[in-house]
Amino acid sequence: MKLKTLLAMGAAFFAVFAVNAQQMSNDAIKDRIKPVGAVHIAGAAAAAPAGALSGEDVYNKACVACHGAGVLGAPRLQNAADWKPRLEQGFDTVLSHAINGFNAMPPRGTCGACSDDDIKAAIEYMIEGV
């Protein structure tokens, strides 16, 4: 009888210990994998679109590299001799070439973010006084 009691007590102890060990193990796992912090990305709010750029701004930002020195035949800033043959084709043709690209002129020059109005303003700035 004593042996049966000892075995029953041992089995009960083992069962309680095993359940408790399992629970401690689950708690330990949860504790080990819980987040240690939170990521909060803060910064300035995005600025509202500034609208159309001035022709001079676009020229200085994207056009001056080629049109400042006449690279690959680019018409130079406010140079009548360079611009006359192009303007004889019509302003709309010049604008189309600037927007869509033509010969060595890449589409939109180097200003992929410029709107059609920005490109138009840049051309108007470059031909001012011609």
Image: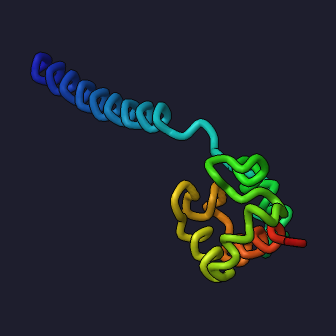
Of the pair 115 and 35, the residue shown nearer to us? 115
State whether residue 80 is above or below residue 10. below
- In this figure, what is the number of numbered marks? 0
Left or right side of 65 for 72: left
- The quadrant in which residue 87 appears is bottom right
Residue 117 in percent (x, y) is at 72, 78
Q: Residue lying farthest top?
A: 3
Whether residue 123 is visible to the viewer of this picture, yes or no, is: yes
Whether residue 49 is visible to the viewer of this picture, yes or no, is: no
Quarter containing the N terminus:
top left
Left or right side of 33 for 63: right
Of the pair 32 and 50, the residue shown nearer to us? 50
Residue 71 in percent (x, y) is at 67, 47
The residue located at (82%, 61%) in the rendering is 79
Quarter containing the C terminus:
bottom right
The residue located at (37%, 30%) in the rendering is 25
State whether residue 82 is above or below residue 14. below
State whether residue 21 is above or below residue 73. above
The residue located at (77%, 63%) in the rendering is 81
Q: According to the image, what is the colour scheme of the structure?
A: rainbow
Of the pair 106 and 77, the residue shown nearer to us? 77
Residue 104 in percent (x, y) is at 55, 54
Of the pair 58 and 23, the residue shown nearer to us? 58
The residue located at (74%, 67%) in the rendering is 83
Residue 124 in percent (x, y) is at 80, 74
